[in-house]
Amino acid sequence: LLSWLLGLAAALRFTDRLAPHLPESLTLSSTRHMVAFVIIFVAVIVFGGAVSYMVNMKVSNSALSSVNRSLGILFGAVRGLLIACIAVAYLSTTEVTQHVAWQHSVLVKKLDPLIRQIRQAAPQALSSEMVIERYPGGITPLFKRE
């Protein structure tokens, strides 16, 4: 979970620095920024995974293995919830919100309050890119439509 948070923080901070160095074949600025964001995010997660593996090898040989597993379950659940929130927030900016299945989705209704809290807790720079309008599914999208 820590590597995911660090990956998100690093991607938000360094995307603008990496984007100009990407190939000219990516003609749209938004595409360059999206690719730069993904590159940084994935690189930090891979590095974090390597560090986690090394720490896990040390811990597995000690008496802390049950604590390690318990924390792994907890962090895994939080990571899954974060992924679900990001997926729902992204999909809420698309036309999928017009479908009946989306409008009657239990998951969307359960995640709506959490996504609103994430939006309120986001840094001001990121908040300026977020929208407040509501869509038929009831969710408040995190990011502006392009």
Image: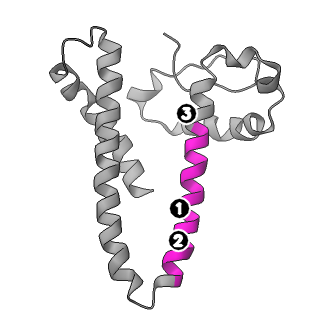
In this rendering, would 87 be left or right of 19?
Answer: right
Label 3 or label 2, whichever lies nearer to me, is 2
Whether 1 is drawn above or below 122: the answer is below
Instruction: State whether the magenta stretch is mostly helix, strand or loop.
Output: helix
Residue 129 location, quadrant: top left
Q: Which residues are magenta?
A: 66-85
In x, y percent, where is residue 117? Answer: 60, 39
In x, y percent, where is residue 18? Answer: 20, 28
> Cβ–Cβ below 8 Å for labels 1 and 2?
yes
**Helix, strand or loop for disc 2:** helix
Q: What residue does disc 2 label? A: 71
In x, y percent, where is residue 86? Answer: 55, 36
Q: What residue does disc 1 label? A: 75
Residue farthest along the front direction in this orientation: 25
Q: CA distance from mark 3 to mark 2?
A: 26 Å
Residue 100 location, quadrant: top right
